[in-house]
C-alpha cells in the first residue's frame, strides 16, 4: 500500500582531537575535523574544521567553516566561513565568503557566480594544481 522510499541519511564523520589522519576522503555526509588531517577531501556536504583542528589539505565541498587551521586550496560551491579563531593559508574559489573579524586569510579568493557555478577552466586549473601538489608530496615522502 505505502511505497517505501529510500533516503540517504547524512551521518556526520568526526576526526577527533588526538587523532592524525592521512589520506583521501570522499563523502556525501558532513565531516568535522577536531584533530589533524593531511590529504584531500571531497564532500557533497559541509566540512567543519573545529577550533583545535588542523588540516593540511586540498578541499572541495558544498560549505566549509574554518574555526581552526587550514593550509591548502579550497573549492566551495556554497559558503566559506572563517571564524575569528580560523586561519586559511591558501587559495579559495567560492560562491560566497564570510571572513569574520579576527580571522586570518592569507591567499587569493575567486568568486564564482550562482548562475555559472564553477567555471570548467577554474576546475581544470585547480585539479592540475592539486595533481602537482600531490606529486610533489609523494616525491618528498619517497626521497
Image (spheres, grey):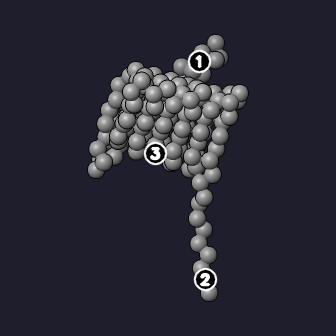
Could you tell me how many numbered marks the image carries? 3
Eyeballing the image, is 71 above or below 42?
above
| Left or right of residue 52, residue 70 in this image | left
In depth, the one of 16 and 131 nearer the eye is: 16
* SS assignment at label 3: loop
Q: Earlier in the sequence, mark 2 or mark 1?
A: 2
Can the viewer see residue 70 in this picture? no
Which residue is denoted by mark 3 in the rendering?
Answer: 62
Q: How many angstroms separate mark 2 from mark 1 (CA)?
A: 57 Å
Residue 2 disc label: 2
Eyeballing the image, is 137 above or below 39?
above
Which residue is denoted by mark 1 in the rendering?
Answer: 139
In depth, the one of 63 and 25 nearer the eye is: 63
* SS assignment at label 2: loop
Specify the farthest residue to the right. Answer: 18
* SS assignment at label 1: helix
The x, y position of residue 67, in whole percent, is: 51, 31
The x, y position of residue 1, in whole percent, is: 62, 87
Q: How many angstroms separate mark 1 from mark 3 (CA)?
A: 31 Å
Can the viewer see residue 114 in this picture? yes
Q: Earlier in the sequence, mark 1 or mark 3?
A: 3
Quadrant in which the C terminus is drawn:
top right
For the residue carrying disc 2, how many other residues have a C-alpha within 10 Å: few (<14), some (14-19), or many (20+)?
few
Which tag is nearer the camera, tag 1 or tag 3?
Answer: 3
Amino acid at each position: 500500500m505505502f511505497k517505501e522510499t529510500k533516503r540517504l541519511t547524512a551521518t556526520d564523520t568526526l576526526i577527533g582531537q588526538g587523532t592524525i589522519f592521512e589520506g583521501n576522503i570522499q563523502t556525501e555526509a558532513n565531516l568535522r575535523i577536531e584533530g589533524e588531517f593531511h590529504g584531500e577531501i571531497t564532500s557533497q556536504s559541509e566540512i567543519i574544521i573545529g577550533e583545535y583542528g588542523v588540516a593540511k589539505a586540498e578541499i572541495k565541498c558544498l560549505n566549509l567553516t574554518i574555526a581552526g587551521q587550514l593550509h591548502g586550496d579550497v573549492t566551495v560551491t556554497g559558503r566559506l566561513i572563517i571564524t575569528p579563531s580560523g586561519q586559511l593559508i591558501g587559495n579559495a574559489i567560492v560562491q560566497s565568503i564570510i571572513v569574520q573579524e579576527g580571522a586570518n586569510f592569507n591567499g587569493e579568493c575567486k568568486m564564482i557566480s550562482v548562475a555559472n557555478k564553477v567555471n570548467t577552466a577554474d576546475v581544470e586549473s585547480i585539479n592540475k594544481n592539486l595533481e602537482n601538489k600531490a606529486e610533489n608530496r609523494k616525491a618528498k615522502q619517497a626521497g
